[in-house]
Image (cartoon, rainbow, N blue to C red):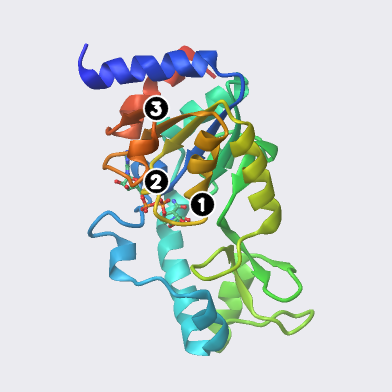
Amino acid sequence: MDATADKIAMLQEWVREASNGVAFTGAGISTESGIPDFRSPGGFWTRNQPIMFDDFVRSPDMRKEAWRRKFEIDATVAEARPNTGHRALAALVAANRISAIITQNIDNLHQVSGVPESRIIELHGNGGYAKCLSCARRYELDWVRGNLDADGMPPDCEACGGLIKSATISFGQPMPQAEMQRAHAAASGADLFLALGSSLVVRPAADFPVLAKQCGARLVIVNREPTPLDGLCDLVIHAEIESVMAPFLRETPG
Ligand code: NAD
């Protein structure tokens, strides 16, 4: 067995031993589904600096640009289907080996892979719809797009006149309190915390692996490249998520 195979075998043993496993996913779990991650070179995000929340609120031009980008990236996201990593996690949730998935992703692929909504904690929201920033009224993206195409400008809330934004959390935007509390409870109660495909530099999300470790969990990181939390880990696997997670899919067929 090579070193990576040994590590995967150890992870399998730890997953079997865990009574309260928690997964934590980042953009890297969705790259195999064709959605570019944030920091890897050459992708959508390296060509487009993120629009800060304050700029979105302050500037009509920024809102227009934010929606233009949103619909550009959505063309890719709409085609995406869950991959081995998503499906392996779904199987582990179904087998009660993993109790919650804390995700930084906004692509809805954990839901599509069959994980019940009650087990998913979306720290950065969901890109599948929009919300009024003032009254939280929900809007469907087709409606936003129709108005944008007709007027050349994004529509405001029909109920209160507030700004409508995709239901995701931008850089600089306050974190959703209920999800933060759920993630805090999940991380502090975990006995195994498995971080998959995250550079672990976006805070406060990246604080949850640290919290889990401080509260006694075994901390495992699976990522293509090193992260700043590797030194804190009980096990680090620098490999493709698919190769690490495929054995779990075979072990727990859906
Ligand atoms: P990130 O892009 O900062 O880090 C992703 C990490 O995954 C990188 O270190 C990369 O080396 C690794 N990786 C990529 N593909 C991999 C694979 N197949 N196997 C193993 N490792 C792989 O992502 P982040 O830490 O999630 O932070 C980015 C922010 O941008 C998040 O807040 C997220 O909300 C948002 N975002 C979301 C999506 C999505 O919903 N799919 C996509 C891009 C960005």
Which one is closest to the eye, mark 3 or mark 1? Answer: 3
x and y percentages locating residue 85 in the rendered image: 42, 32
The label shown at residue 13 is none
Which one is closest to the eye, mark 3 or mark 2? Answer: 3
Q: Is residue 250 visible?
A: no
Which residue is painted at 56% across and 73% down in the image?
145
Amino acid on which the number 2 mark rests in the picture: Ser
Viewer-closest of 141 and 173: 173
- Circles 1, 2 touching at the beta carbon (< 8 Å): yes
Q: Which residue is mark 1?
A: 205
Of the two numbered discs 3 and 1 on the same chain, state the one appearing first in sequence.
Answer: 1
- Circles 3, 1 touching at the beta carbon (< 8 Å): no
Helix, strand or loop at mark 1: loop
Whether label 2 lies within 8 Å of ligand 1 gets the answer: yes
Q: Is residue 200 visible?
A: yes
Q: Which residue is mark 3?
A: 234
Whether label 1 lies within 8 Å of ligand 1 gets the answer: yes
Which one is closest to the eye, mark 1 or mark 2? Answer: 1
Q: Quick check: 13 left or right of 119?
A: left
Amino acid on which the number 1 mark rests in the picture: Ala
Query: Where 18 sits versus 104, above or below?
Result: above
Q: Which residue is mark 2?
A: 198
Viewer-closest of 121 and 152: 121
Q: CA distance from mark 3 to mark 2?
A: 17 Å
Of the two numbered discs 1 and 2 on the same chain, state the one appearing first in sequence.
Answer: 2
Amino acid on which the number 3 mark rests in the picture: Asp
x and y percentages locating residue 185 in the rendered image: 67, 40
